Image: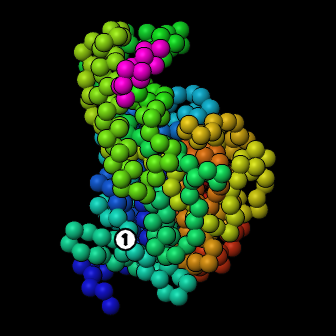
Amino acid sequence: MPRYAEICSCDVLVCGAGPAGLGAAMAARRMGADVVLLERAALPGGTICAVPWMPVNRLYTDGCQRSRIHQEFIDNLLKFGPASSRPGKANVIDGDGIHPHPVYAELAIYDMLEAAGVRYRTHSPVSDAIVDGSRVVGAVVCEKRGPVAYRARVCIDATGDGDLAFAAGCAFEQGREEDGLHMPITLGFSLGGVDCDRFFEWYGDEKRPEFLKMLDEADKNGRYVATWYSLNRATVPGIVGVNHGAWRRQPLTSDGLNAADLTAARRNGVHIAADLIQILRENRVPGMKSCFIDQLGGILGVRDTRRVIGEYTVTYEDSQQGPAFSDSVARKYGHIDGNQLFVGGMKSGFSYPYRAMLPRGVDGLLVAGRCGSATFLGHCAGKSMGNMMEIGIAAGTAAAMCAQRGETPRQLNIDDLRHALIEEMKVSL
């Protein structure tokens, strides 16, 4: 038997503390389960904290409360006052969201988890699965002090990369089906020293062609230029958050599971930030005379890696036709955003089936978030953070019910789960 530095037990183990993992952990705890939440990075939140003042979209539904858990996150954020966030953009990709201050977002997550009684640990990357026959009964994480084992009645993989499912031997797909390409990996950042009123007056739609022209010229001159930029006003004076579509010359074969590709993406992202400063200054962009790099994003923006093969695979056709699944447990709102590979419309609010959370051939495990069972475009359709949180809520609710009943996720009565989501989690199905 392996020698562990520590052995922990719980009802529900959630691996990954991005939007899906947060939704799962909070829902399972609100259903009465003893929950442990693990995160490989130094901070929870995933994409929420990846880019300063990035739009965290689909936290509402048409401006109204989306679920009990969504509202808890919003309330914990807003209690920090006007500096905590700005209203989100109102467009097909970024609608129904907010732009949070990254520090206050992180604090809001800590406060939310602690108030609910969720036990959480960061710096805890999953290195192995604990399997009994065909059933996942826990995970091993690799800490500096040695391996730590977490045993649970039910496990949820919300790692994004499907790390626990992969360790348990689950089958998966990766990349776009026809050519294996991936959405690019990015590093967000923020600029300081900006006269925001002057800049955003200039940056309006009537000036965008001028901005694009200077970017094209800089690219020709060897500067690191992104395929697109989204510049967002911060909640504090003189700061602008920058999201972007990755270096124009970054290969779309870059793999978010490959350390060499991740290293290159980070290096390219730092160049993009430094070169944007020079481009803005040299072109005398209004409000940018004294701009500087304020901070870099807490983590890289990895948009797609493993998609675990489940009992149902969400497809592009589902996003267009919106079938009424009898096991619908969440909805995906918004647009299809396959950065650089595909952007298009969808039936906003299409159903997400419970079966997409059940990996084939493995029991005791639910997958939630971007590692859920989907085709490439099925994943890209409505991959917004609010949508991922709602999928996590469904997984957490199901896991808690299974732990209390002594059932596996496959044995759970779907009508009971849907009733709990509607009545207890206040999700509109």
Query: Which residue is depicted at the point 27% across and 34% down?
Result: 295
The region drawn magenta spans 213-224
Q: Which residue is mark 1?
A: 127
Q: Position of residue 31 (x, y in %)?
A: 51, 66
Is residue 70 at least partly visible in the picture? no
Q: In which quadrant is the N terminus drawn?
A: bottom left
Query: Which residue is depicted at the point 33% across and 49% down?
Result: 263
Is residue 301 at least partly visible in the picture? yes
Find numbered disc 1 in the image and state the secondary structure of the residue it sits on: strand
Task: Tell me: 345 left or right of 402.
Answer: right
Q: Position of residue 67 (x, y in %)?
A: 57, 49
Q: Residues within 10 Å of mark 1 (few under 14, many from 20)?
A: some
Q: Position of residue 350 (x, y in %)?
A: 71, 48
In the rendered image, which quarter is residue 74 located in?
A: top left
Give the overall secondary structure of the magenta segment: helix
Does the magenta run of residues contain 395? Answer: no
Q: Which residue type does callout 1 highlight?
A: Ser
